[in-house]
Image (tube, rainbow, N blue to C red):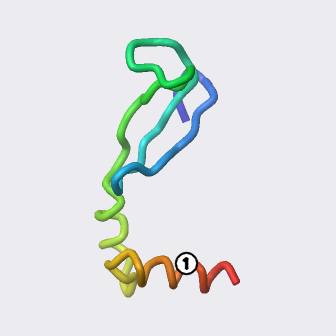
């Protein structure tokens, strides 16, 4: 969360977690501004033992957990 308390959302773009906040500025996307790119999700996935590395297997594991 931003230190100043602004509304924020997180998104994943090309295996990278991004933090977006409300505001105006250069490069604003309908009032949302990219505050920072937080981490590479491939590093997060690699740190979890037994987690599949290919996207198809990963989606199967996630869907199995949801059902």
When the figure is inspected, residue 40 is found, relative to residue 37, above or below; the finding is below
Q: Which residue in the rendered view is the most extreme toward the top? A: 25
The one nearer the camera, 1 or 19, is 19
Please report the residue visible at 61 percent of the width from the left and 24 percent of the height from the top. Answer: 6
Quarter of the image containing the C terminus? bottom right
Q: Which residue in the rendered view is the most extreme toward the right? A: 67
The one nearer the camera, 49 or 7, is 7
Residue 45 appears at what percent x and percent y? Answer: 36, 70
**Residue 5: quadrant of the picture:** top right
Please report the residue visible at 34 percent of the width from the left and 53 percent of the height from the top. Answer: 14
The residue that mark 1 highlights is 62
* Left or right: 23 in relation to 35: right
When the figure is inspected, residue 64 is found, relative to residue 18, above or below; the finding is below
Please report the residue visible at 42 percent of the width from the left and 29 percent of the height from the top. Answer: 35
* Left or right: 13 in relation to 64: left
The one nearer the camera, 11 or 38, is 11
**Residue 22: quadrant of the picture:** top right
Residue 49 appears at what percent x and percent y? Answer: 36, 83
When the figure is inspected, residue 29 is found, relative to residue 61, above or below; the finding is above
Please report the residue visible at 49 percent of the width from the left and 25 percent of the height from the top. Answer: 29
User: How many marks are shown on the rendered structure?
Assistant: 1
Residue 27 appears at what percent x and percent y? Answer: 39, 19
* Left or right: 44 in relation to 22: left
Q: Residues within 10 Å of mark 1 (few under 14, many from 20)?
A: few
- Secondary structure category for the residue under label 1: helix
Residue 39 appears at what percent x and percent y? Answer: 34, 50
């Amino acid at each position: 969360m931003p230190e100043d308390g602004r509304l924020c959302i997180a998104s994943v773009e090309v295996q990278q977690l991004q933090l977006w906040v409300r505001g105006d500025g250069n490069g604003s996307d309908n009032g949302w501004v990219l505050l920072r790119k937080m981490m590479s999700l491939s590093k997060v996935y690699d740190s979890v033992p037994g987690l599949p590395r290919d996207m198809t297997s990963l989606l199967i594991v996630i869907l199995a957990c949801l059902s």
